[in-house]
Image (cartoon, rainbow, N blue to C red):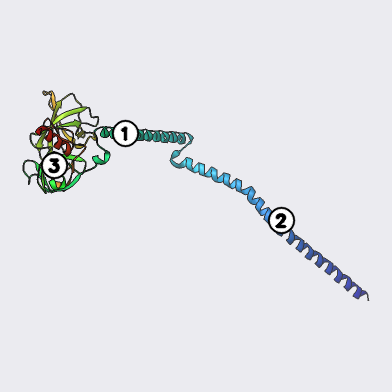
Amino acid sequence: MNKTYRRNEQSKKHLIIGGAMFASFVLIATVVRIFLPSLSDLASRIATPVWTAGEHASLVASLGSVGGWGGGSLVAENMALKEEIEALRNERATAFADLHVYTELVSRFGRSLEEERMGILAGVLSTPPRSLYDTIVIDAGSRNGVSAGMLVYANSDMPVGVVARVGAVSSVVELLSSPGRHIEVVVGASGETRASAEGLGGGNFVIRIPRDIPISVGDSISLPTLSSARIGYVSVVDVVPTDSFQTIRFSFETSLQDLRFVMIRPYGTSIFLVDGMTIPFSSEESSEEEENNAL
């Protein structure tokens, strides 16, 4: 009897303990399920600023170690960039101003920028020494709108000669470098030094100017036109102590033997002196002058 009672008491205790443990497990699981995401989010919120600050400090430290940059160096670099930007802005403003002046000058002469770019493309049939007397022969003539006095360009922007004789389908161009021919040129980019260049043949020229005028090898040689058409660069400067003049030599920028095509311009840049005579800038004006002379 007593044994049976004790067994029942022990069974009840085991049930109570087991129930309490199960209830505790359920309670703990519920608490963890409810509060664990919040705790994780809270931990993340606490850790993120610390990690971000550390990352920022590491980045600054790494930047400071690259090339030895420091606060003063960054400020100096920033100032240099600002000065460079300002210089580029000034250059752009100057370029726009020059374009405005050029456009105004061209319009005063009754021409437009579109007319300045007009031209007749022609193939080169022969060049020196195959052609005579420092000339080239082209495959464009009166049928193509070519007339005597038009300026002939190599590479579309470098004057090399003047149309001398015109046929129906071909023309003869006398080169500016023909022996004994004199053309007015500008030496240097400033445009202040003008001189007479004498042709030596084969695209070569010689200039004699006072020795006290500063001239260096590499200075540009251009025609005194609205667009300052460049024809070459100074290649030799000869100075003799007993001579008050210096001798300058230059050649066409483009080899005449390599010419395959040329551009013939009826308008614009052909206003310059050849042997003391002004080359007409328009075939129409040439016709008007001939008619006036005939009258």
Q: Amino acid at mark 3?
A: Ser
In the foreground, 104 or 38: 104
Q: Is residue 56 left or right of residue 133?
A: right
- Residue type for callout 1: His
- Measure the alpha-carbon separation of dots 2 and 1: 76 Å
Q: Residue beneath label 2, please? A: 35
The image position of residue 144, as x and y in percent, is: 16, 47
Q: Quadrant of residue 211?
A: top left
Q: Dot 3 surroundings within 10 Å: few (below 14), some, or many (20 or more)? A: many
Q: Earlier in the sequence, mark 3 or mark 2?
A: 2
Residue 240: horizontal and vertical position, in percent? 12, 26
For residue 194, side relative to residue 5 (left or right): left
Tell me the number on the disc at residue 209: none
Badge 2 crowding class, 10 Å Cα cut-off, few under 14, some 14 to 19, many 20 or more, is few
Q: Is residue 252 visible?
A: no
Disc nearer the start of the sequence (3/1): 1
What residue is at 19 percent from the left and 25 percent from the top? 213
Residue identifier under label 3: 147
Q: Quadrant of the N terminus?
A: bottom right
- Give the quadrant of residue 216: top left
**Comparing labels 3 and 1, the label whose residue is closer to the camera:** 3
The residue that appears at 41% across and 34% down in the rendered structure is: 80
Name the residue that disc number 1 marks. Answer: 100
C-alpha distance separating marks 3 and 2: 98 Å
